[in-house]
Amino acid sequence: MLGEGILKGLAETARNFAGSFVSKERMTTVEYPEVRLPLPEASRNFPFLVYDGNDWEKGLRCVACQICEKECPPKCIYIEKSKDKKPDYVGKPQIYPAKFDIDISVCMSCQICVEVCPFEAIKMNTEFELATTDRFGGLLLDRHELAKSNEYYHTIHPTEATEVDARLAAEKVKVEAKAKAATQAAATKAAEPASAAAAVPAVAKPAVAPVTQASSPKAAEVNAAPVAATTPAAPKPVAGTGTDGAAPITEAEKKTTSEPAKTTEGEPKA
């Protein structure tokens, strides 16, 4: 029948209007802004930056890795990395974003920046009352305006925030255990040369001392051998050379003894 759908819609509206006077379940609307309904946990609007501790500037989880800036489809995130390090909320020197702006007039709430962040530093806010008369400067939020505490994160996304805190705590324990193991390994490696150097003399001394003592038969033979070889031998006597004790006889002496003495005729006989 023509107009049947229109009549069904009007009947439902009339039923809820009359029923709202007797039952709260028939109240399909509230008088906003005086009355506000709680938002679902999965609702999202624009990103914000999470910080730990009481100081937003020291406690920002963001370390300006710029991954969200590169992955943002509409390119509405602007980051400048610091040239120095400042202590974070636990006193650890850390790189920080010197500038972190998000142009929410360009942001399309896709949540990709949240998905790619490795430090759980950027999350989606549920705040939607962001109307302003300044179209440009009023919709460009800086890091101070974007910073929200971890407690605020737990308020708007309690389930997700609890999971994130548990994951960060587990990673922190793992990193501390790894650092402790590395420190112990370095200490053990540094102690090894000292212990090895101390052990070498203790083993070498007892091994050398018995060999050099004369009590060893072989050592005695080795020590005696050079003495006998170096003692000069007595020369053998050779006849006629004087080495046998008698003086050698010359050729003139032999001739004198073999020939008789000559006598001269003119000489008187005695």
Image: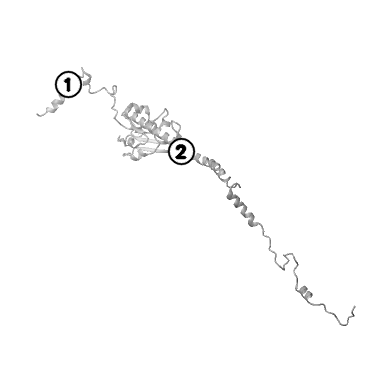
Q: Is residue 109 left or right of residue 200?
A: left
Residue 173's label in the rendered image is none
Q: Residue at x 58, y 49 (%)?
A: 217
The amino acid type found where label 1 is placed reads Arg
The magenta-colored residue range is 184-188
Which residue is under mark 1?
15
230 or 44: which is nearer to us?
230
Which residue is under mark 2?
185
The amino acid type found where label 2 is placed reads Ala
150 or 37: which is nearer to us?
150
Of marks 1 and 2, the one in the foreground: 2
Residue 185 on the magenta span: yes
Instruction: Give the overall secondary structure of the magenta segment.
Output: helix
Q: Residue at x 40, y 38 (%)?
A: 80
Residue 124, how many percent across, how many down? Answer: 32, 32
Image quarter where the C terminus lies is bottom right
Q: Is label 2 in a helix, a strand or a loop?
A: helix
Classify 10 Å Cα crowding around label 2: few (below 14), some (14-19), many (20 and above): few
